Image (tube, rainbow, N blue to C red):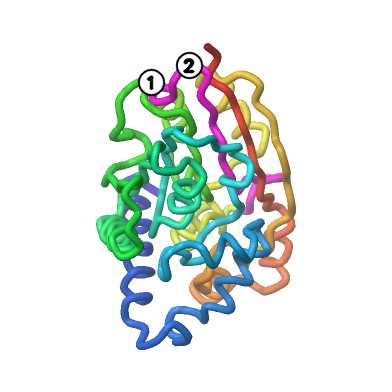
Amino acid sequence: MKEGEIKKAVRERYAEVVKRERACCSPASACCGSPAMVEDISKNIGYTEEEIQMVPEGANLGLGCGNPVAIASLKGGETVLDLGSGAGFDCFLAANEVGKGGKVIGVDMTPEMIDKARENAKKANYENVEFRLGEIENIPAADNSVDVVISNCVINLSFDKGRVFNEAFRVLKPGGRLMVSDIVLTKELPDFIKDSVEAYVGCISGAVMKEKYIQAIRDAGFSEVKVIDETSFPIDYITNDPTAKAIIDKMNAPKEDLKEIGNLVLSIKVEGIKAR
């Protein structure tokens, strides 16, 4: 698979998520997956009922694999950068933590997601949040400008994860923190999954071995790198769209094979520090 092909597929897939959500005639419409299903996914990956209810309607699309805000220990007045911010779910949670004296910047490469996030911020009067169109390999933010970088199930989608972590290191202030939730592997995936665009877009085939992921963070210059939490992650919970069904249908993969692949996938929460 080529990088350009993958970026195009990822961008189109997340644009379609926004279009489906906007096409729903009511909050409970089944065309986008019911709110109950989205909430169930969110609770299973670490969000509380209070967090789910406090963000603007439409901000939580059920696309994450963990709750990076829960481990970020955010403080009032801090500046937070969210890589792959989507419709703004984690950004709004972070904004509540840093308060009016703080600032949250969301970065996403999908114009439709940026438009949706800005719409959510406006309707809920979030004045301390802004959303920027850009790629996480080239973060649109100045050197040494943010206190915390967070990300939720997005870095696995990048072809160049090392560059993403280098960029995160660049924009962090000395003493700044990296806090990410993401998908990694315990064993290499079979070739029929590695070569699948559908699996890549579904946060599966773009994932790398856990050790390689952690080393990429260290290589970027971060110290005190550690895994805070890790759990097995059912393949059909990686996104709220039918990724597993797409793999079965388009690649004729037996359900038994898909279940085995799910056993190779971990959801991890990782932190690192940019030394002063």
* Residue 110 coordinates in the image, percent (x, y): 30, 55
Relative to 174, is 47 on the left or the right? right
- Taking the spot 45% from the left edge, 43% from the top edge, the residue there is 99
Secondary structure of residue under mark 1: loop
* Residue 226 coordinates in the image, percent (x, y): 69, 30
Residue 173 is one of the magenta-drawn residues? yes
Task: Look at the numbered discs 1 and 2 and tell me whether their residues touch, using CB distance below 8 Å.
Answer: yes
Q: Which mark is residue 144?
A: 1
Does any portion of residue 12 appear in the rendered image? no
Q: Which mark is residue 174?
A: 2
| Neighbours of disc 2 within 10 Å: few (<14), some (14-19), many (20+) | some
* Residue 221 coordinates in the image, percent (x, y): 53, 17
- Taking the spot 53% from the left edge, 64% from the top edge, the residue there is 239
Relative to 59, is 261 on the left or the right? right
- Taking the spot 39% from the left edge, 43% from the top edge, the residue there is 100
Identify which amino acid the numbered label 2 is placed on: Pro
The Cα–Cα distance between marks 1 and 2, rounded to whole angstroms, is 7 Å
